[in-house]
Amino acid sequence: MQQFTVPQFIDVESKIIGPITTRQFLIFLGAGIFIALFYKIFDFTLFLSVSIPVAILAVAFALVRVNGRPFHFFVLNVVQTWRRPAIRVWNNKLDPVEVEVQNFIFTEKIPTKEFYHRSRLAELSLIVDTAGEYRGAWQDEEEEIMLEDEFGA
């Protein structure tokens, strides 16, 4: 049998410049380009007021980890939560309407699944082990019943 090497540590990003990964380098590069554009376009006070938040966001997106995951995943989860909040809170205090529904007794029998007993599981494992050659006693009984129904015997 041919052996394959299984990749390990797939969640570790490769480092390109010292301790900086490719993602971090691109984030810092993009922030640097924006800050350089702001320096050329704006006067100094507006440049400072715009470039400092950009630098802080770049450092946050590049270096900060929340619960062991990169910051951009955290921001994506926050945005998804804001767009479609689905808070499900368990309330152990029931309304009177819900209590009446719970006390209602159903007269219909609810169908339940048949549980397999140990002997049935052993027979099923024998069928699987023999790749279907052994059909099992319960299958033979079902075929006899089907033949009786079909031919009226």
Image (cartoon, rainbow, N blue to C red):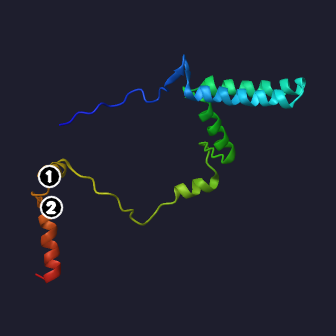
Q: Quadrant of residue 29?
A: top right
In the depicted structure, whether residue 4 falls above or below residue 143: above
Name the N-terminal-most of marks 2 and 1. Answer: 1
Q: What amino acid type should be assigned to the residue bearing mark 2?
A: Trp
Please name whichever residue, 136 or 153, is drawn nearer the observer in this view of the structure: 136
Q: Which corner quadrant of the image does residue 54 belong to?
A: top right
List the residue tagged with mark 2: 138
- Residue situated furthest top in the rendering: 18
Asked if disc 2 and disc 1 are in contact, CB closer than 8 Å, the reply is: yes
Which residue occupies the extreme bottom position in the image? 152
At x 21%, y 50%, the residue is 117
Residue 133 visible in the displayed image: yes
Q: Residue at position x 52%, y 60% from top?
A: 104
> Residue 123 location in percent, x, y?
14, 52
Q: In the image, residue 12 lies at what x, y percent?
A: 47, 26
User: Farthest residue toward the front?
Assistant: 40
Looking at numbered disc 1 in the image, what kind of residue is underneath it?
Glu
Where does residue 125 sit, x and y in percent of width and height? 16, 49
**58 and 83: which one is in front?**
58
Quickly name the residue at label 1.
Answer: 123
Q: Is residue 75 left or right of residue 135?
A: right
Task: Where is residue 91? Give x, y as percent.
Answer: 61, 43
SS label for mark 2: helix
Q: Which quarter of the figure is the C terminus placed in? A: bottom left
Specify the label residue 137 is tagged with: none
* Other residues around mark 1 within 10 Å, as few (<14) / some (14–19) / many (≥20): some
Viewed as shown, does residue 30 lie left or right of 38?
A: left
Q: Secondary structure at mark 1?
A: helix
Q: CA distance from mark 2 to mark 1?
A: 9 Å
